Image: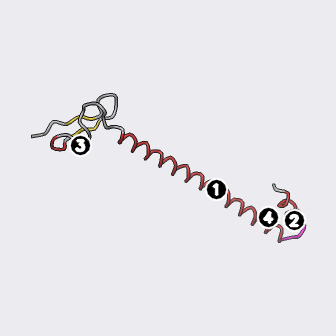
Amino acid sequence: RPLLEEAVLGYLHNESGFGQVLRAALFVVRAVLWAAACQFLVVGSLLIALFLCVLVSLWRLLSVRPFSGLPRMGACPGGLQLLQLGPTPPHFCAKSQE
């Protein structure tokens, strides 16, 4: 406990009801502040994790574009295209269903 809080509570403890009310009020304020700080940390951590997930997803989508002679995204005739992530070619054109 901080020294000032200990001194105030020690002084007011000798007085009957007011010291106990102040002690309860300080306890409630401290609990509310701790809850707010924990909630801020949890929400902040979740927001940072969500932002990182979105950033990684965008980076993976943008880095799928091949650099060899393969066609670029959307270059298939009729717009039919399959996207595949992995060690195989990043994407290939689907055969048309005609």
Please say if the residues under marks 1 and 2 sit with CB atoms less than 8 Å apart. Answer: no
Residue at the far top: name it: 87
User: Which sits earlier in the primary sequence, circle 1 or circle 4?
Assistant: 4
The amino acid type, in three-letter code, at marker 3 is Gly
Estimate the spatial distance between the alpha carbons at disc 1 and disc 4, rounded to whole Å.
21 Å
**Image quarter in which the N terminus is found:** bottom right
Apparent side of residue 98 relative to residue 71 in the rendered image (left or right): left
Residue assigned mark 3: 74
Callout 1 crowding tier (Cα within 10 Å): few <14, some 14–19, many ≥20: few
Q: Which mark is residue 37?
A: 1
Tell me the mark number nearer the camera, choosing from 2 and 3.
Answer: 3
Residue assigned mark 2: 13
The amino acid type, in three-letter code, at marker 2 is His
**Which element carries disc 3, helix, strand or loop?**
loop
Residue at screen point 33% across, 37% down: 64
User: Which sits earlier in the primary sequence, circle 2 or circle 3?
Assistant: 2
Q: Nearer the viewer, residue 19 or 30?
A: 30
Residue at screen point 19% across, 40% down: 76
Please say if the residues under marks 2 and 4 sit with CB atoms less than 8 Å apart. Answer: yes
Say whether residue 1 is magenta. Answer: no
Estimate the spatial distance between the alpha carbons at disc 2 and disc 3, rounded to whole Å.
76 Å
Estimate the spatial distance between the alpha carbons at disc 2 and disc 4, rounded to whole Å.
9 Å
Residue assigned mark 4: 23
Please say if the residues under marks 3 and 4 sit with CB atoms less than 8 Å apart. Answer: no
Please say if the residues under marks 2 and 3 sit with CB atoms less than 8 Å apart. Answer: no
Q: Which residues are magenta?
A: 11-17
